[in-house]
Image: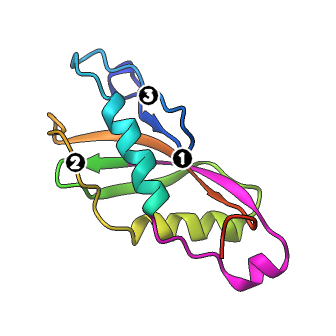
Amino acid sequence: MSPASDPVLATNTPVASAGSLRSVNVDYGWLAALMAQWIEGLDKRYPAGLRAEGIEGKVTLIALLHEDGSLTNVRIAKGSGNTALDQVALEDVRNGPPVKFAHPLQRPQISVKFSISYDLKTTQ
């Protein structure tokens, strides 16, 4: 990826950082925090079969976030080690609601990178 298309990094942990955006001098720290909040509120499916087998993991995804809040071109940047769990993460993001912006995106789309964790201790 070129520096102008480096993805904004968001996690569902307190530490989130924005990627380098040289073509537009805009601070996207707010977007990293917003994406982390969106991930936290995402209605994640955790299939009973995977839970019964004790399958846990973190899936890191990359997607294009559009100014209307939709996510497209969702793909796996780093898998969890379990193909079924990776597919669940892809489906959860693709079926998730649009991201609601607190600030204008100031561009038609931006690449975002984020992780979703599936943890037996925190999932019902």
Image quadrant where residue 54 sits: bottom right
Task: Please identify the quadrant where the C terminus is shown.
Answer: bottom right
- Which residue position holds label 2? 101
Residue occupying the point 17% across, 55% down: 68
Q: Which residues are magenta?
A: 42-63
Q: Is residue 119 magenta?
A: no
Judged from the image, the secondary structure of the residue bearing numbered disc 1 is loop
- Which residue position holds label 3? 1
Disc 1 to disc 3: CB gap under 8 Å = no
Residue occupying the point 32% across, 20% down: 21
The kind of residue tagged 3 is Met
In the figure, 29 relative to 102: above or below?
A: above
Q: Mark 3 and mark 2: span between their CA atoms?
A: 25 Å
Q: Position of residue 24 (x, y in %)?
A: 21, 19
Q: Position of residue 37 (x, y in %)?
A: 42, 50
| Circle number at residue 46 | none
| Circle number at residue 12 | 1
Image quadrant where residue 55 sits: bottom right
Disc 3 to disc 2: CB gap under 8 Å = no
Task: Please identify the quadrant where the N terminus is shown.
Answer: top left
